[in-house]
Image (tube, rainbow, N blue to C red):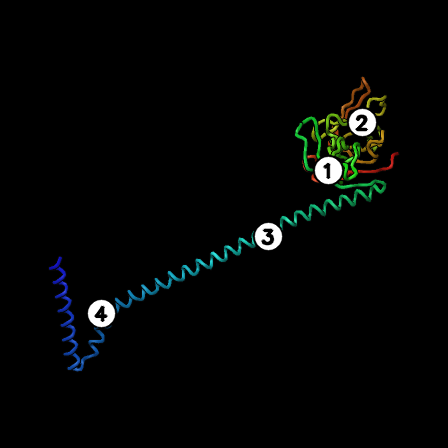
């Protein structure tokens, strides 16, 4: 190894000496241009390597500069995206509140004799046969048992229990519910009983002679009989009619107007004129 190093040193020294002598001779002979050309030829590869390395370093620096810029842009986009999501959420809440206010105003305009208080649904019954809702209003808000609960779509039910700050509503689809009803088209009077989570059954069994008084598509309203519910509230639409000629009875399936699975707010009728 030492021999190799010494040999390499001797060769390098010899080349340097030869180039020095050669350059002196050429300079004396007035041919320095040849030396310059030779040096240019010899140094060209080194300059190319140096330039390549310099370009690589510049590219490396540019890469990290661009990387930092992209990170900053991504962070800005993330913040803007979060702000946009918040705006969309706020807009959805405002749209929901506007829809609720429109329903509230519409109900008041069509029922000028009613007194209302609004409430929010804070709980739902879990049973299939028994349907109930819990509201965020109670006796401290003037709520009493038996009060009627509605939405802009129609009848929800009645207050069955009242606490200080909450109350329970038995829905018209509950198996224990019975509502004095009539067919809006023919004024045929009957009773709507709770049947399943989305339907009631309209029953009429007192000497019916005109079976055309009820048909699919008829709208069923509250009759106001019994003074529990005010008259003129929509219950739903008849989807099926079963007629028993022998007993002269009619059982009609009624699709309720209110979407009980998606109720968020309701109106409690605190006062109405009894007909």
Instruction: Name the residue that disc number 1 marks.
Output: 165
Can you say which quadrant of the picture contains the N terminus? Answer: bottom left
> Is tag 1's residue or tag 2's residue first in the polypeptide sequence?
1
Residue depth check, mark 4 versus mark 2: number of the one nearer the observer: 2
Q: For the residues marked 1 and 4, what is the alpha-carbon distance in whole angstroms?
A: 96 Å
Does any portion of residue 238 appear in the rendered image?
no
Q: Could you classify mark 3 by the number of other residues whose Cα lies within 10 Å: few (under 14), some (14-19), or many (20 or more)? A: few
Q: For the residues marked 3 and 1, what is the alpha-carbon distance in whole angstroms?
A: 37 Å
Instruction: Name the residue that disc number 4 marks.
Output: 42
Residue depth check, mark 4 versus mark 3: number of the one nearer the observer: 3
Name the residue: 22% across, 74% down: 37
Q: Which mark is residue 44?
A: none
> Is tag 4's residue or tag 2's residue first in the polypeptide sequence?
4
Q: Could you classify mark 4 by the number of other residues whose Cα lies within 10 Å: few (under 14), some (14-19), or many (20 or more)? A: few
* Helix, strand or loop under label 4: helix
Instruction: Name the residue that disc number 3 marks.
Output: 84
Residue depth check, mark 1 versus mark 4: number of the one nearer the observer: 1
Q: Nearer the viewer, residue 119 or 156?
A: 119
Q: For the residues marked 2 and 3, what is the alpha-carbon distance in whole angstroms?
A: 51 Å
Give residue 225's position: percent from left, percent from top.
85, 30
Q: Could you classify mark 1 by the number of other residues whose Cα lies within 10 Å: few (under 14), some (14-19), or many (20 or more)? A: some
> Is tag 2's residue or tag 3's residue first in the polypeptide sequence?
3
Q: Which mark is residue 191?
A: 2
> Is tag 1's residue or tag 4's residue first in the polypeptide sequence?
4
Name the residue: 53% across, 56% down: 76
> Is tag 3's residue or tag 1's residue first in the polypeptide sequence?
3
């Amino acid at each position: 190894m030492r021999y190799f190093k010494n040999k390499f040193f001797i060769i390098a020294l010899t080349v340097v000496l030869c180039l020095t002598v050669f350059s002196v001779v050429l300079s004396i002979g007035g041919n320095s241009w040849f030396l310059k050309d030779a040096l240019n030829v010899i140094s060209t590869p080194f300059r190319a390597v140096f330039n390549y390395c310099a370009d690589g370093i510049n590219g490396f620096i540019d890469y990290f500069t661009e990387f930092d810029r992209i990170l900053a842009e991504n962070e800005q986009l993330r913040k803007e995206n979060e702000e946009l999501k918040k705006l969309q959420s706020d807009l959805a809440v405002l749209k929901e509140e506007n829809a609720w206010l429109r329903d509230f105003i519409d109900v008041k305009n069509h029922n000028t004799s009613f007194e209302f208080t609004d409430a929010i649904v804070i709980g739902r019954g879990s049973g299939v046969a028994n349907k109930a809702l819990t509201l965020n209003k109670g006796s401290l808000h003037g709520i009493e048992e038996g009060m009627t609960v509605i939405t802009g779509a129609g009848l929800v039910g009645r207050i069955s229990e009242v606490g200080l700050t909450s109350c329970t509503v038995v829905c018209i689809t509950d198996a224990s519910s019975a509502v004095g009803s009539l067919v809006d088209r023919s004024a045929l009077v009957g009773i709507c009983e709770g049947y399943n989570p989305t339907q009631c059954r309209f029953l009429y069994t007192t000497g019916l002679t005109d079976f055309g008084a009820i048909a699919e598509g008829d709208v069923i309203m509250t009759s106001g009989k019994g003074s529990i519910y005010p008259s003129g509230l929509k219950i739903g639409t008849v989807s099926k009619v079963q007629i028993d000629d022998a007993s002269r009875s009619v059982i009609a399936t009624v699709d309720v107007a209110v979407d009980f699975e998606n109720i968020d707010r309701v109106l409690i009728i605190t006062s109405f004129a009894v007909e």
